[in-house]
Image (cartoon, rainbow, N blue to C red):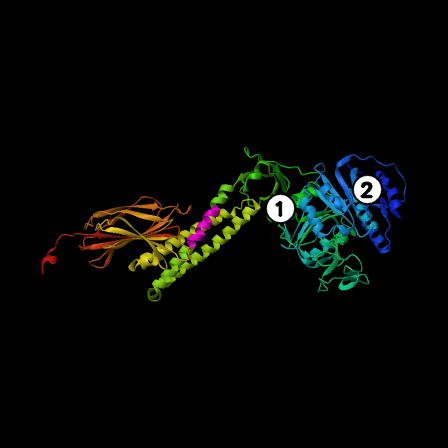
Amino acid sequence: MQYPAYYDFTLVKDIKSYQDATSLTREGTIPLIIPFEDKRLAKWKEVLAWYGLSTVEYREVMEQDLSDQRNIVISIGEAFSVPARFYADANNRAFLHIQDGEIDDVVNNQAYESLLFIAPSEYFTISRIRELARGIDIPWGFITAQDLPGITFVIAKLLAGRSSPHRNCGIIDLISNTEQQANINGRLNVPTIIDCNRIQSLVIERNWHTIILRAHGEAAHVNLNSVVLCGLVNEVERVITGEPIDGCRINSGIRQCKRVHSKDTHIISFGDIKALHLFVYSCLSLAVNNGLYPSNLSTIHSIGEGYPRMAVITDRVLHIHPLDPIIVLDLCRQEIGFGEVVQFENDLALRRINCRPYVLFGDPLGSTPRWATIDYASKKRPGSVNTVIPLHLKEWSDVEIIGLDNSDSEIYLMRGRDKAAIIRPVARGKTSTGIIDKTDMWHMYTEWFKKIGKRLQRAASIERAISILYKLQEHSIPGFQDMLRNISKVRVMLEEGVQESLQICEFVRREGVWNNSLDLWVNLCTLKVSLWDHQLASLILNHLFAGDLQDTLTHSFIFTARSESLDCHYCRSPLTTLRLVDPLECQPDQYVVKCPSCGVQEVWEYGGERILVDLPPSLCPTYTSKINLCFSTSQTQPLQYIRDGVLIVELVDKGNNNVLFRLQERVNSNPYTLVIDVPAEITSELHTIKLAWIHGLFVTYLRRRWPSYGPLTQSENSY
């Protein structure tokens, strides 16, 4: 839509003269009702001169015809109806005059494309604005003022700003303590650290087309470190009933603010910032009047009485994403209407926090985004030199988690309900990327981290059992305590990693956008799981095999069931399987297989792997024995990504009470062949072979009796 250019303004005395002067807009002249206060009028003249307007005398011209019936200017009540109609006529738009109770009919009208509400400030309470935000799904905004002259000044700025010469754009981020400005081509430069003196020069002295402030603040105040923005409009802060209070004030032309306690801090009004468009990204920056603190401090009135023609503020306490200012500034640079920009931001916030917290003080009408689309089937890649590529999700809207197929770590994706944005914050040529579906990967990773978390409870239980059952060894055997302490350190680090990873998974679910750090966390947690497996295997082989490992694995468990199974492979006695449960129900059930003659043969747990072994009938001196092992999964699959397990084996000569064979080996094949070279000096005895398999925080124990029948020697027959 083409708008006329405005060159000057004319002063009129009352509402009738203002109504008669509305036709002047065709000649580039804006009417303005003279306020009662001379100081206020002087400020307005200074602001409009900054916009490039000069003062002219009143003259009559012909009225213009109305054409646009889709973008509506709405006056609520009688007070501002004449200026509202004037603004609608000046912009060739439809005008609608309604009462307070008729707002729902306007909001629900599907024929409208944008809405601009004009009414006294008493109407725009925070609760009313939040109600409008929930009910309106098209671009909308509002303007208001303290009085009738004030609304004509706000309208004059809206009209004059279209031909303003000011073009500087930038971001001042006091949360990250950086600033970014657009270069000559409009793209953002690299962020730089900002100091206090720099803040003063940027905020107070620089002329801006668009400036975005990301900072802490509330209740009509924003803290810019060395500068504080104060919402005081009149000479003194007053409560609702009109009495002055000991708050913000102006004494002899000098501002005093209740939030400032240092003489080195500059106090300015929101309206003192020389910017056509002001984005105040802080907590609850929306304060019309009688808001969070019931006084006449007002962000909106401060802006309305000053330089900015439009502003975007927030209606609640919230965390503002550091990429939000970049998105906003680049969309504005692409000449997208502020209503569309705010709607885009609110669409992103809907997915994050399920509300629309951003509010436009100003006219929502403007050009619409140049939407890029990525077809689901062909995955077309949009290329753009812009910092931000706005996207319609279309086929991707039903996909739970989306991600970028570009490995560039400086390209980001942000997603709302219906829209998304690809962002490259720093200018580095043309951006080209595509979107991929990461939903299955997200589900897989989330379940994997949860399984690791459950397994860590079992790992901690094993460590506690070792500390209790091997208390004497822990303090008497060199190295035992250090090995156990190292195992616990690895587990604690793993717990922290799993917690961090699950937090990222939840963040990804809320955002609907994949986070590449999850791939790194899977690799890191996999390494730590393997490290725990290896360290526990070393402790078992060096110390725990000498005791009763089965007691360690079943410590604190309670017997709950018994069943008969196959006969013992050696003595053919019937085997008994005992089922043990955790009384706190935090760990998987343990199963112990016993032979009445040979003793404990196996300990395994629900969900873990069992060792299936095929032993030769006997050990033959000087011969090589090959044992075929198989690791069988019971009930559930072992942890994904943990491919290697640790096998430990110990063969004890019962006659000489010494170790014939010992092995600790990383195994990634199934089945596995174990080779034992039987020494000649082995005694004729019923020996014991012990095996343990540690894989993905699972521990399985197997014990078998294995005889050896050596030939009778001379020394053995001499007695």
Query: According to the image, label 1 marks what residue?
Result: 350
Query: According to the image, label 2 marks what residue?
Result: 85
In this rendering, is residue 111 above or below 444? above
Q: Secondary structure at mark 1?
A: helix
For the residue carrying disc 2, how many other residues have a C-alpha within 10 Å: few (<14), some (14-19), or many (20+)?
many
Write the residue at 38% across / 58% down: 462
Disc 2 + disc 1, Cβ < 8 Å: no
Quadrant of the image containing the C terminus: bottom left
- Residue 649 in view here: no
Q: Earlier in the sequence, mark 2 or mark 1?
A: 2
- Taking 59 as reference, is 118 left or right? left
The residue lying toward the viewer, choosing from 445 and 146, is: 146
- The spot of residue 580 in percent (x, y) is 35, 55
Specify whether residue 609 is painted magenta: no
Q: What amino acid type is highlighted by mark number 1?
A: Leu
Q: What amino acid type is highlighted by mark number 2?
A: Arg
- The spot of residue 396 in percent (x, y) is 57, 38
For the residue carrying disc 1, how many other residues have a C-alpha within 10 Å: few (<14), some (14-19), or many (20+)?
some
Q: Quadrant of residue 683?
A: bottom left
Residue at the far top in the pictured view: 378
Secondary structure character of the magenta stretch overall? helix
Query: In 3D space, how far apart are the residues under numbered discs 2 and 1 (Cα atoms)?
Result: 33 Å
Q: Which residues are magenta?
A: 445-456
- The spot of residue 204 in percent (x, y) is 74, 54
- The spot of residue 458 in percent (x, y) is 40, 55
Write the residue at 12% across / 55% down: 713
Quadrant of the image containing the N terminus: top right
The residue lying toward the viewer, choosing from 515 and 612, is: 612
In this rendering, is residue 519 above or below 232? above
